[in-house]
Image (cartoon, rainbow, N blue to C red):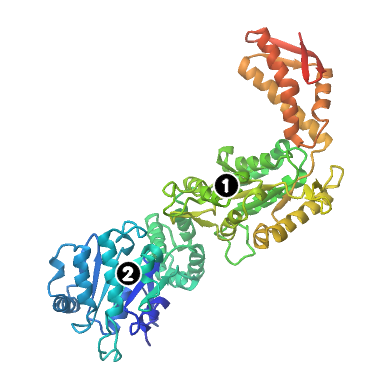
């Protein structure tokens, strides 16, 4: 039975009679599987190409790159290697292994010799072809002449007589290896039937499973009864990795003395570059349990939102986020969509999540999506594409996650972002990874993503085209939740025409209630305590408010709850902090002083305090 080769290798083999040059792009630096009934074998691309050519009766493969110059493949010291060198010397007229790296002008002569089928059956591989020109959009004279010559050569080259292995006439092909197809001048390959561009894909699950089984033999535990299960898990965890990456993972596992069952940990370290995973620490369960008591004191008056958020965190801590999917390990550890009125604690709860999982609120990264209303502003997140200003800097989002793979990321007011930018979240939510403008892959599998939105609080009145309230403070929470979720669904499915993004959020939409009168008083009490504490800390002055002043101030600050807790803080700043600062500044008190506020008066916009 013939060995099974990758699809692109079979495509090359079957088209040698009709194409004189090939552009191979994409996953060119990987290794590839050659399967036989007895075993599978990993081969570098150069070796695989020679396997195809040798089977078709070719005598040697000439390789070229700008560093090492020319070489003859196979370069072994056995009889096969000697035959290849002899054939190359006959075709090229010299021993190229002793020559210096040729110029582009000299390379043209070698390509002419190789493609001359009358001299022998040969092929040429131009490695790192993406670097032949400094800028494919602005070729200098030598670069232009070289590519023009090669384009003409593709049309003037003729197929040679067949061999016993392949009786039909075949070309002596040139293979160009590039990262991207457009790394070569567009006019070079356009409308040229003698060129064939072939993209080399990333390995699929079958390739990864066969590679996992092959690599498992080098690890302890590769012969146990659960080896097949561990190999399958390794292949699933390696989604997005190349086969060469999988080989690197096993090297890392051997270095850390891990068994086959420890490969998931090795994959995580290989992807994220971090040894310690906070999601696997024993203290996380304790923190979440403590959070059930502490978070309601930070996020006041939102029992439903706090409970659902903690439930999702518990699910994430157990590794069960997206457990209903066949492959869920690469998805973000947690996804939350906070919706509801302004100033009700959405950002505060996001900070509480960061403190619970990662120990501090500094693991909290915030993006104000109103700054991303223009389509091109998405470059700030993942970096500008090649050739644009700022390309070398990278993206704010991808850079931050690579530096700290475990963090809470808040995308505030997501509905204000440009719809094209929202499309970038599809890959993050589904696959847990994102490729930036420089081609580097960033993994979000250790992150908690939180989206906030005011969708559903107001809606557009069809009659007047004006924004009108959709929910009221007197509505029961069940009604608020239903109306807000319905508005979110309508926005993503009808307005944006992106129901697939809504599906990625699933049931992780957390609706916040209005701030109730009771909750407002608790928020006021907490913020007032913060003010008095900060005065004492900064000025060493103790400030006390009489009960009457406190009650009157509370009534003023909580009179309008349309802006929630943020509105209470704004009112305290105007009604207490400003007049208190004025009074303390005028008195020039020394440290250790005690100041009592016995009365507070409002005269228009002015507020005056009576201090004793």
Quadrant for the N terminus, please. bottom left
Residue that protrudes farthest toward the front in the picture: 141
Residue located 69% across and 51% down the image:
311
Mark 2 residue element: strand
Task: Provide residue 310's location: percent of width, then percent of height.
Answer: 69, 48
Depth check, front residue: 494 or 30? 494
The answer, for residue 397, to whether it is visible in the render is no
Residue 508 appearing in the image: yes
Q: Is residue 398 left or right of residue 532?
A: left
Residue 50 percent coordinates (x, y): 29, 76
| Residue 98 position (above or below residue 395) | below
Where residue 214 appears, as percent x and y from the top left, is: 40, 71
Q: Is residue 375 left or right of residue 495?
A: left
Q: Which quadrant of the figure has residue 25?
A: bottom left
Of marks 1 and 2, the one in the foreground = 2
Side of 468 relative to 84 (left or right): right
Left or right of 189 on screen, residue 608: right
Coordinates of residue 409 in the picture (x, y in percent): 58, 46
State the residue at coordinates (50%, 62%).
237
Q: Residues within 10 Å of mark 2 (few under 14, many from 20)?
A: many
Determine the secondary structure under disc 1: loop
Report the Cα–Cα distance between label 1 and label 2. 52 Å
Toward the viewer: 28 or 158? 158
- Mark 1, Cα crowd under 10 Å, few <14 / some 14-19 / many 20+, is few
Q: Quadrant of the C terminus?
A: top right
Q: Which residue is mark 2?
A: 176
- Is residue 442 or residue 483 the one in the foreground? 483
Report the residue marked by disc 1.
282
At 30% from the left edge and 90% from the top edge, which residue is drawn?
168
Q: Is residue 60 above or below residue 417?
A: below
Image-quadrant location for residue 486? bottom right
User: In which quarter of the view is residue 497 placed?
Assistant: bottom right
């Amino acid at each position: 039975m013939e060995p099974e080769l990758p699809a692109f290798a079979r495509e090359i083999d079957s088209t040698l009679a009709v194409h004189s040059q090939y552009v191979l792009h994409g996953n060119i630096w990987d290794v590839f599987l050659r399967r036989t009934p007895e075993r599978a074998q990993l081969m570098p691309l150069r070796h695989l190409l020679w396997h195809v050519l040798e089977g078709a009766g070719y005598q040697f493969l000439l390789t070229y790159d700008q560093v090492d110059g020319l070489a003859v493949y196979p370069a072994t010291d056995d009889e096969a290697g000697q035959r290849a060198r002899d054939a190359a010397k006959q075709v090229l007229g010299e021993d190229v292994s002793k020559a210096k790296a040729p110029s582009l002008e000299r390379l043209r002569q070698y390509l002419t010799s190789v493609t001359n089928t009358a001299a022998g059956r040969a092929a040429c591989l131009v490695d790192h072809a993406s670097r032949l020109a400094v800028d494919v959009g602005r070729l200098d004279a030598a670069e232009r002449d070289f590519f023009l010559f090669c384009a003409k050569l593709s049309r003037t080259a003729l197929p040679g007589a067949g061999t016993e292995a392949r009786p039909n006439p075949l070309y002596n092909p040139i293979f160009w290896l590039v990262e991207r197809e457009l790394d070569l001048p567009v006019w070079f390959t356009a409308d040229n039937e003698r060129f064939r561009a072939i993209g080399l894909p990333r390995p699929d699950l079958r390739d990864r499973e066969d590679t996992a089984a092959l690599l498992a033999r080098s690890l302890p535990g590769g012969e146990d009864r659960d080896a097949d299960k561990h190999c399958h898990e390794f292949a699933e965890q390696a989604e997005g990795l190349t086969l060469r990456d999988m080989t690197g993972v096993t090297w890392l596992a051997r270095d850390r003395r891990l068994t086959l069952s420890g490969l998931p940990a090795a994959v995580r370290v290989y992807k994220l570059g971090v040894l310690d995973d906070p999601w696997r620490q024993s203290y996380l369960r304790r923190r979440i349990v403590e959070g059930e008591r502490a978070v309601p004191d930070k996020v006041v008056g939102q029992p439903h939102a706090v409970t659902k958020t903690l439930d999702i965190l518990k699910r994430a801590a157990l590794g069960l986020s997206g457990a209903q999917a066949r492959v869920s390990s690469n998805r973000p550890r947690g996804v939350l969509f906070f919706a509801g009125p302004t100033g009700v604690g959405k950002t505060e709860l996001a900070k509480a999540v960061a403190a619970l999982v990662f120990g501090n609120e500094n693991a909290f990264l915030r993006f104000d999506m109103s700054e991303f209303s223009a389509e091109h502003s998405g470059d700030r997140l993942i970096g500008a594409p090649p050739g644009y200003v700022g390309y070398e800097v990278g993206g704010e989002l991808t850079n931050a996650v690579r530096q700290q793979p475990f963090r809470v990321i808040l995308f505030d007011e997501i509905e204000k972002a440009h719809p094209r930018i929202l499309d970038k979240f599809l890959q993050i939510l589904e696959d847990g990874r994102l490729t930036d403008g420089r081609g580097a892959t960033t993994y979000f599998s250790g992150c908690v993503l939180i989206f906030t939105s005011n969708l559903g609080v107001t809606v557009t009145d069809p009659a007047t085209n004006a924004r009108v309230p959709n929910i009221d403070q007197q509505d029961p929470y069940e009604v608020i939740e239903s109306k807000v979720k319905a508005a979110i669904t309508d926005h993503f499915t009808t307005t944006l025409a992106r129901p697939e993004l809504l599906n990625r959020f699933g049931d992780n939409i957390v609706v916040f209630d209005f701030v109730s009168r009771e909750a407002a008083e608790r928020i006021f009490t907490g913020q007032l305590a913060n003010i008095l504490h900060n005065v004492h800390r900064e000025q060493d002055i103790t400030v006390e408010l009489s009960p009457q002043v406190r009650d009157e101030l509370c009534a003023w600050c909580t009179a309008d709850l349309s802006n929630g807790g943020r509105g209470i803080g704004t009112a305290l700043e105007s009604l207490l902090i400003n007049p208190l600062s004025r009074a303390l500044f005028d008195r020039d008190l020394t440290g250790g002083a005690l100041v009592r506020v016995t009365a507070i008066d409002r005269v228009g916009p002015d507020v005056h305090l009576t201090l004793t």
